[in-house]
Image (cartoon, helix red, strand yellow):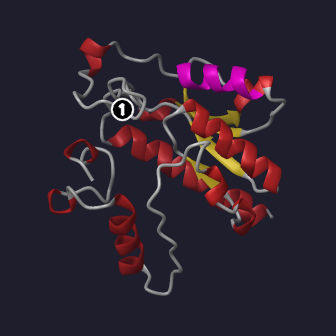
Amino acid sequence: MSLTNINRQIIALDSTVGRLKVEVAKERVLDINPDCQVEAREMFFTPENAGEVDFSQYDYVADAIDTVTSKIELIRLCREAGVPVISSMGAGNKLDPTAFQVAPIEKTSVCPLARVMRRELKKRGITGVKAVYSTEESLTPAQAQSGDEKGTAGRPTPGSMAFVPSVAGLILAGEIIKDLLEG
């Protein structure tokens, strides 16, 4: 956990800074329901280590990865395993949590990350991936006051308001539950 997580992740607290996210998340889940089975994996998912995960063991996969190559590989492997996946697009530099929509990736608009994902998935013949995306235009860095910390791709992480990524996550979770209940 880092200080920059505190504004957007419920498990991020001053007391958890410096600890592994997966362990803090596991503790939280088990504190809520001790009967849950939690497999905590300490890994940054990439195409290079993707083979370490057996996607056929999952009922549904929620993609909240920031890097395009890893998102694409995750989606590709889920499709290959016949496991439904929902992909969250960009929430950084956004202010309006009511602008989130859910649609197949090829029906998304406005979101720069969704635009790249549409193009890259189309190249690979992958369609119909459910996506959570925002129709709000991104704020400029001066408007958003993006963070100083570098993201996983070495670029500055787009700043985010505490409530925006959490709303995207709740929408993502709600879609998974609806899909699982509809069977």
Q: Which residue: 24% across, 48% down?
A: 2
Q: Is residue 36 above or below residue 106?
A: below
Q: Which residue: 24% across, 28% down?
A: 147
Quadrant location of the C terminus in the rendered image:
bottom right
Amino acid of disc 1? Gly
Q: Residues within 10 Å of mark 1 (few under 14, many from 20)?
A: few
The residue wearing badge 1 is 151
- The part of the image, by quadrant, that contains residue 27 is bottom left
Residue 92 point in image, percent of width and height: 39, 29
Q: Which residue: 73% across, 48% down?
A: 77
Residue 117 point in image, percent of width and height: 65, 27
Q: Which residue: 63% across, 50% down?
A: 50
Residue 32 point in image, percent of width and height: 39, 77
Q: Is residue 147 left or right of residue 172?
A: left
Secondary structure mostly taken by the magenta-highlighted segment of the chain: helix
The span shown in magenta is 112-121
Identify which residue, 125 or 183, lies in the foreground.
125
Res. 111 in view: no
Give the secondary structure at mark 1. Answer: loop
Res. 103 in view: yes
